Amino acid sequence: MKPVVLERRKFLAGAGLAWLGSLAPAGAEKLLASDVLFAAAYRDPQGAYGVAILDEKAAVVSSHPLPGRGHGFAANPRVEWLVAFARRPGNFAVALHRGMAAEPLLFHTPADRHFYGHGVFSADGRLLYAAENAFETGDGVIGVYDVTDGFKRISEFATHGVGPHEIVLMPDGKTLCVANGGIRTHPDQGRQKLNLPTMAPSVAFIDTASGTLLSSHALPARLHRLSLRHMAVDASRQVWIGGQYEGDVFDDVPVLARLHEDLGLVSVQLEDRVATALGKYAGSIAIGNDGVTLAVTSPKSGVVITLDTRTGKALDIDMKPGTCGVQARKDGFVSSSETGRFGASSHDCAWDNHIARV
């Protein structure tokens, strides 16, 4: 089945201009009063999809249409672009510019690739790395896009695993950490998971300059059906990874792991009450501004859990029905829900799983 490619001309007809440059006076006033902005993908009551830019009080500053359901983002303080990625197995991405004159850029994967919903900019902001699926073989790849040339795809390299999901750039600015979720998909079968009995999730460190695999890490074989998906890096360079268990509901398995470049990948044994609250499903994950507080959501059970990364102990369990996304803010974390809640505000939409700071 050939991917559906939306014509750029048709997309631009409804897309508007830059997300900061085209603000109405009310939106500009909200912007000036806010120290931080957030981006989140949504579905409106009519079933249309888009990206909203919100201020720190969860008021919408601007909104922009997407051709289909969005998922995660690439954002970098050094880069004027915010990129929203299609949810798996979508093949589009939309880049929104902060400036006044630039139109949104709609770009796609090659015909035999699809996005996994996440990406990250290079340290200098000149390249975009995107998690992709070479779906005829099932191999995970990182597509490399030239930001300075209209997000033209210029190369790719292997993730050395199946189903790459979130990507983070390590503090050294030259190493990617990739969560290979282990699940194979094909656009002809939509979001169907095709290889659950043989899943092999892993986390890989990859050199951005050469695409060389630096190291690959896996949990014990008994946890091979724990799909490793979303990540955050703490102040001590530990990578925290949230998992989504695809095995028997009665299995006793951890859904959180941490990876240290010297100590390897280990599962995090949470207190019983915390593990029960997560329900074998870790969704969005974020590190607080202090570098040592971790927040994890579980859309399955509607909960936000905060942990101390130094001890692994829970600091708080906040039950909020429909909770899906979480992100650090000035005084802790902000979360969103599938029912329209964003922080303490309510909106007439369903938020997707992730919030980006922009």
Image (cartoon, rainbow, N blue to C red):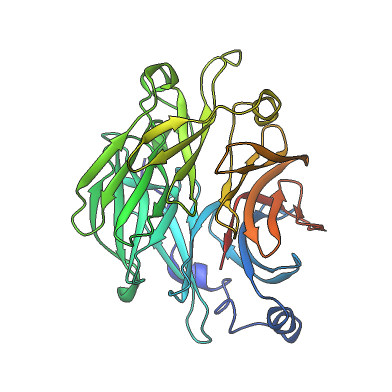
Is residue 352 shown left or right of residue 87?
Answer: right
Residue 266 percent location from the top left of the image = 43, 30
Is residue 48 shown left or right of residue 340?
Answer: left
Q: How many marks?
A: 0
Task: Please identify the quarter of the rendering in which residue 284 is found.
Answer: top right
* Residue at 56% in and 71% down: 15
Residue 117 versus residue 21 in the image, above or below: above
Task: Please identify the quarter of the rendering in which residue 355 is found.
Answer: bottom right
Q: Name the one closer to the observer, 8 or 212.
A: 212
Q: Name the one closer to the observer, 89 or 323.
A: 323
* Residue at 55% in and 61% down: 66
Q: Let me know if residue 212 appears in the view.
A: yes
Task: Please identify the quarter of the rendering in which residue 254 is found.
Answer: top right
Residue 334 percent location from the top left of the image = 70, 56
Residue 282 percent location from the top left of the image = 58, 36
* Residue at 50% in and 47% down: 87
